[in-house]
Amino acid sequence: MTIKKLMVAAGLAFAASASQAEPLNIGFVYVGPVGDAGWTYGHDAARKAVEEKFGDKVKTTYVESVAEGADSARVIRNLAQKGNELIFTTSFGYMNPTLKVARKFPKVKFEHATGYKQGKNVGNYMARAYQGRYLTGLVAGSMTESNTLGYVASFPIPEVVRGINAFTKGAREVNPDVKVKVIWISSWYDPAKEREAAETLMLQGADVLTQHTDSAAVIQAAEAKGKYAIGYHTDMSAYGKSAHLTSTIHNWAPLYIAKAEAVMNGTWESQSLWYGLKEGVTDIAPFNAAVPAEVRTLVEEKKAQIKAGELQVFAGPIKDQQGTERVKVNESLADDDLKGMNWHVEGVDSKLPEA
Amino acid sequence: MDIDLITNILYATIRTGTPLILIALGEMVCEKSGVLNLGQEGMLLVGAVIGFIAATVTGNLFIAVWFAIFAGMLMALLFGFLAISLASNQVATGLALTIFGTGLSAFLGSNYVGIGLDGMQPLAIPLLSDLPVIGKVLFQHDPLVYVALTLFALVFWLFKYSRLGLKIRAVGENPEAANAIGINVQLLRYAAVLFGGAMTGLAGAYLSLAYTPMWSEGMSAGRGWIALALVVFASWKAERILLGAYLFGFASILHLVLQGTRFEVPPNIMAMLPYVATIVVLVWLSSDAVKTRLSAPKSIGRPYRPMS
Amino acid sequence: MLKLEKRPSDSRLMAYLSPLIAILLTLLCGGILFVFLGHDPFAALHTFFIAPLTSVYGWTELGIKVAPLLLCAMGLTLCFRAKIWNIGAEGQFIMGALGGSIAALQFLDADSRWALVPILLAGTLSGLGWAALAAWLKTRFNANEILTTIMLNYVALNALLYGVHGPLKDPEGFNFPESALFADATLLPVFSDDYRLNISILFALLAMVAIWTLMARSWVGYQIRVLGEDAKAARYAGFKDKQLTWFALLACGALAGLAGVSEVTGPLGQLVPQVSPGYGYAAIIVVFLGRMQPLGILFASMLLALTYMGGEMVQMEMTLPKSLTGLFQGMLLFFLLATDFLIAYRLVWRRQPASHSTTASQA
């Protein structure tokens, strides 16, 4: 078939250009611009970490702002065709295109972020961001005076629901009177709308805010009103020097380095990875000076317990919003339940939109 | 609902409506002269990014606002040269401006994403801001909100009382006739288009310097198109633009406040409303000749070149 | 001094030459831009415009983008020729995708190819229905179609988002906003399993020939041309302008709808929120670039499709930003609109300004 010839030709051309070391070629597909200070920025930082770690042994290529429609399959395929042996596709919408392309390139390894499907040569990976959410919830619950926390959310997918629940759980552990109000803005990214949602939450009495959207508008809104806020994706302290308490951050570097190493050693296999605090993929940003020492100590303690596997965020007893017990004492939610989470824990003061 | 909540909703309404007022007023003047500029979104983004870059570089918000205005005017000049001097198709030229502006702003702004900026601070007007309710709702905003209201008054006066307003209308109704009575059609159209660019540039500055002081790609999120709908919704009348913009702002704030109550509306249905409302108004306006004559500029979208 | 002067009649030569001049000017400016970015302009332009087409695969991918552009553009030509400024191909495309997907989701267990027929029909009719709204508003209420179609685009977009976040969401999909994958039998047949190119390109070429014949040879086509050139004359001649308006808009809606349903049953295989990367708007550029002539439009849609692919290519090869695609498209259209002027006007050299040409009408 022609395609095989093309692949061989591409491979040869490639081998000729970099024959001396034969580095491992790794491709990255990003949904936003690399400088978005959010989701994509984190992935690109990890790409740089891979380059730093392996030096000449790897060569990375990235394509940014790839729309999640029909065009993404072409970008992924082009990367495969150009001799990349490991390709990371870093947004949910690339799931089906990645699987389609992967079938045509059985020798190339693909890794898709945040999805739920796997293939022979397609693994998927996610971050246990909810662990970070839980820790920041502890901070928020300690810092609130109004006992009302605000959460600006995008869409009611399990990832977001899990974050809200973990945050609420953390906050109520230190302060059982806390309520969390959620506003859904039906967009991943609309700074003006994010800001208005934040303002509305503050109107409703929230004095510590956080968000599961992509801009830092919520932090800015809190800063302007003299309230507190907790960032997401990256350390967002630049947007609110006094408001920003901490952020839940992603650090994909350990995962990317491990995967690159596995391909080099020929030990790569299709896995469904869910890394968190223990592996360093989820973490929290440095604290604001306003966070008292005892809160810091508590957070560090809990963090150490989670890392050591002694503490599960969703350990029972957990009641849902209606007061029904969902998790019994001495039990905790299994990963499969977490992956499909579609209910709110007690303490979330807003209704979950129709699933 | 308590009075504090209502006050705050109204306050947010004014803030949300402000960029729409600026863009829509500019576009209205432009359309009154018979030129339809569909490049609002492009000019808005370029205004926003240039304003933000200027603010980051100079550290002076006042200068940055002027840069944004100037950038909007430059974009409008490009449009004007093609659509007025070269009599190109206004629809195609406007769309090209939007595509170009979106690309250009992303290109210029790529190094300025993820930078924080101390944005414009609210400016409480002495005495007035101490009034109960009204003081909070109207007189504790950032300076650009007051600028927008001033510009509204200017445009209102322009078409209500001034000879210039009459001339612009004449050009928009029938450029040939206007030319025959000695009005410089091309010059007036250029002026109107440039005014539109300045207003949209200013609205861009409002977004990136006051409303959400940051730059990120596509941050206008379609506000240029909403403003375009607003002009029609307002049947080309300044006072109705003001009303329409606040109505829109009010509805979108209310939508957030009502979330989770039984008055909740699905967000996408909500997002449709301004466009559906605009179609309804347009139908109502177009349904009889008298209403049409009193509202829509007749020569809108039609290029004009004087014979030479 | 140099002066602009109206030609006695439009220049045929310039009509063909001006797109070429526009392309050359775009390349020139693009080259300069690349130099400023610190790249070899020739290598960069090569990567942008040539490299995507150096393989069979590249051409098939071009075909995937050309098909929707060409379908929308041919429909728009019909409207624009009649001076009906339909900006609504985007909304009609989206409605086609939406309607087609609703149908396709009823056939998730289908194993017969015949299931495609009702699906394609549903998509085509959805696009047609959406255009019918604009036609009704224009003929019944005299509402300006530029404005109504822009508004309808946004209504359509929100209808799509509502569907994909709500009732059409994959029940097994963990609430993620996309529909279930369509059954294999309900996907458009591809030419070879190695490529994604499917028979929608044939629909597009067929539409091109059909519209060409219609415009050049048929009585309806003649009436549309007259209506566009001189509406008064058309009415005087007894042409029914309302019927022609209906015809042009419905035909455009159907073609755009077909393009939409071909996208979901083609390269996507499911309904997603990002179903259109702006094909309906890009098609407007294509029509102007292609001078409303069938072959011109074919080349223009290829050129525009190439700017998307080239944008991806320079990103991958030279890590240049994605936004270059928009810059190139904008420049191309600006230059084209500017050089169009030379069709009706010419530059002449005059020693003295002729006094008789500056009459009262001089601006």
Image: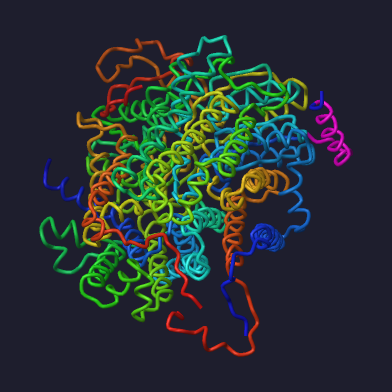
Against C28, residue B106 (above or below) is above
Q: What's the colour scheme? A: rainbow
Of all residues, the one furthest to the front in this rendering is C237
Magenta span: chief secondary structure: helix
Q: Is residue B12 magenta?
A: no
Front-lying residue, C205 or A18 = C205
Q: Residue at x 56, y 31 (%)?
A: A280
- Please tell me in which quadrant of the rendered image residue A115 appears: top right
| Image location of residue A235, percent across then percent down | 48, 44
Front-lying residue, B72 or A11 = B72
Against C18, residue C138 (above or below) is above
| Image location of residue A343, percent across then percent down | 34, 20
Q: Residue at x 23, y 68 (%)?
A: B156
- Image quarter hosting the C terminus of chain C: bottom left
Q: Is residue A17 magenta?
A: yes
- Please tell me in which quadrant of the rendered image residue A171 appears: top left
Is residue A303 something one can see in this rendering? Answer: no
Q: Residue at x 78, y 24 (%)?
A: A265
Is residue A257 something one can see in this rendering? Answer: yes
Answer with left or right where residue B241 lies relative to residue A329: left
| Image location of residue A18, percent across then percent down | 85, 40
- Image quarter hosting the N terminus of chain C: bottom right
Q: Residue at x 11, y 43 (%)?
A: B2
Answer with left or right where residue C355 lies relative to residue A344: right
Front-lying residue, A123 or A137 = A123
Against A296, residue B190 (above or below) is below
Magenta range? A4-24
| Image location of residue A335, percent across then percent down | 48, 16
Answer with left or right where residue A66 lies relative to residue C24: left
- Please tell me in which quadrant of the rendered image residue C152 appears: top left
Q: How many marks?
A: 0
